[in-house]
Image (tube, rainbow, N blue to C red):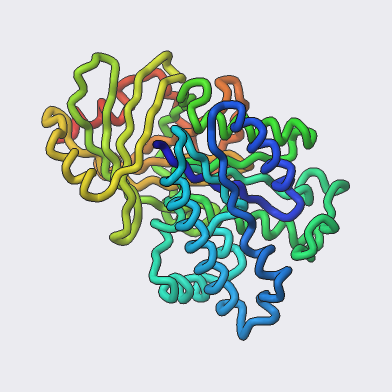
């Protein structure tokens, strides 16, 4: 059985309720058993448990995070008992949404209270999809009448939307769906992004890669919607020519998650990608089958959300004058709005010498 857990989040009045219904109808027809975890904040606030009724905001957030964690555990345990091949758990908001409602000190305090760390909480989900509030780009449709737990003005909603994007930035599979479409097209875009992640009809990855001048690291680390992630990448032997198998350790400050990825190229920009989350023990066992002709790649990745697009800037210890910036797209012809503080040298999507597997052969 395959159990996948995703988050659908977003600012107030973003279209999540409609999205949930559409997700269920679409995926039921594709053989998925779809389970929905209701928004925890709405359950608590409509029941009388709120930041303004608890002793403090931190008290409330701690309780909400504890309940969210337990709900997810129960749904995951229930999924394992079901007689079906594919189970999709859809969370109406996830644990990291709480970060948007706290200052940094409060968040760190609550993490200690629930005995958790940010990396493991954020990356416990397989993918995260953010719907931008109607207050940004479709203000005439903004309303709170459909949710009694919501009281934000359009200005407050827009600010909260930014904070939510910042809270999830750093996740390996994060997508932002904005209001550059009409509402129906926005929901279709979300469904398309989810299906693309699930590999329906096939697990395609469309990526463009750019060689850039060495970025201003201090500036990147000062941006709210930019998150540093430490990556160690190891390549395994593959019996098939044109197939790449890699292991990845990903995280920060001693807290890591682990993945195994198989890639097969279809064209310069498009490839089939199959990714599996590993336990630490599985990761350590697979390290024994590493391709000894290639060295480990160590890099700092800066995940950057810019104009609702998700860039990954890889900084390598063996380069002092350049770096690599990548972006995954849902369509090869999607226009890209590049960060104005990044200086692009050239596109290197089709140049093999800039692929990580090639770099691993050159490291001395």
Please tell me which residue lies in front, 73 or 205.
Answer: 73
Residue 240 placement, left or right of 215:
left
Q: Is residue 38 visible?
A: yes
Query: Front-most of 138 and 301?
Result: 138
| Relative vertical location of residue 22 with respect to residue 44 in this rendering, above or below | above
Q: On the rendered image, what quadrant is the N terminus found in? A: top left
Q: Which percent across, then down, holds residue 214?
A: 39, 42
**Residue 115 higher or lower than 344, as above or below:** below
Q: Residue at x 51, y 46 (%)?
A: 304
Residue 6 location (% of width, % of height): 52, 45
- Quarter where residue 99 is shown: bottom right
Residue at the (64%, 82%) spot, across then down = 54
- Estimate the x, y position of residue 215 in percent, counting from the top left: 43, 45
- From the image, which quarter does the C terminus lie in? top left
Work out which residue is located at the far bottom of the displayed protein and give it: 55
Q: Would you identify the image quadrant in which residue 41 lies?
A: bottom right
Horizontal relation, residue 19 to residue 332: left or right = right
One can see residue 224 in this view: no
Which residue occupies the extreme right position in the image? 140
Q: Compared to 249, does 107 lie above or below?
A: below
* Residue at image point 44% right, 43% down: 172
Q: Position of residue 178 (x, y in %)?
A: 69, 40
Q: How many marks?
A: 0
Residue drawn at 39 percent across, 71 percent down: 115
In-image side of 251 versus 38 (left or right)? left
């Amino acid at each position: 059985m395959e159990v996948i857990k995703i988050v659908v989040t977003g600012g107030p009045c973003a279209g999540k309720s409609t999205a949930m219904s559409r997700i269920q109808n679409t995926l039921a027809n594709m053989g998925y058993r779809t389970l929905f975890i209701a928004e925890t904040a709405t359950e608590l606030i409509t029941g009388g448990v709120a930041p303004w009724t608890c002793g403090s905001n931190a008290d409330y957030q701690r309780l909400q995070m504890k309940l969210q964690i337990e709900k997810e555990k129960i749904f995951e345990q229930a999924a394992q008992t079901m007689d079906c091949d594919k189970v999709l758990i859809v969370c109406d908001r996830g644990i990291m949404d709480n970060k948007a409602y706290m200052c940094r000190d409060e968040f760190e305090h609550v993490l200690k209270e629930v005995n958790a760390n940010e990396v493991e909480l954020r990356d416990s989900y397989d993918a995260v999809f953010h719907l931008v509030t109607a207050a940004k780009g479709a203000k005439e449709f903004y309303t709170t009448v459909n949710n009694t737990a919501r009281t934000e003005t359009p200005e407050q909603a827009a600010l909260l939307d930014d904070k939510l994007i910042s809270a999830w930035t750093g996740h390996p599979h994060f997508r932002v769906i904005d209001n550059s479409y009409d509402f129906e097209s926005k929901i279709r875009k979300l469904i398309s992004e989810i299906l693309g992640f699930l590999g329906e009809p096939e697990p395609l990855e469309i990526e463009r890669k750019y060689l850039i001048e060495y970025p201003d690291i201090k500036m990147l680390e000062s941006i709210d919607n930019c998150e540093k992630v430490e990556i160690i990448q190891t390549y395994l032997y593959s019996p098939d020519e044109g197939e790449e198998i890699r292991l990845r350790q990903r995280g920060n400050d001693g807290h890591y998650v682990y993945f195994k990825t198989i890639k097969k190229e279809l064209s310069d920009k498009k490839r089939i990608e199959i990714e599996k989350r590993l336990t630490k023990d599985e990761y350590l066992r697979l390290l024994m089958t590493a391709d000894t002709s290639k060295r480990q790649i160590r890099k700092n990745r800066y995940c950057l959300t810019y104009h609702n697009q998700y860039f990954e800037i890889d900084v390598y210890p063996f380069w002092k004058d350049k770096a690599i910036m990548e972006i995954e797209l849902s369509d090869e012809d999607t226009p890209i709005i590049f960060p104005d503080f990044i200086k692009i040298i050239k596109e290197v999507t089709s140049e093999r010498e800039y692929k990580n597997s090639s770099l691993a052969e050159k490291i001395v």
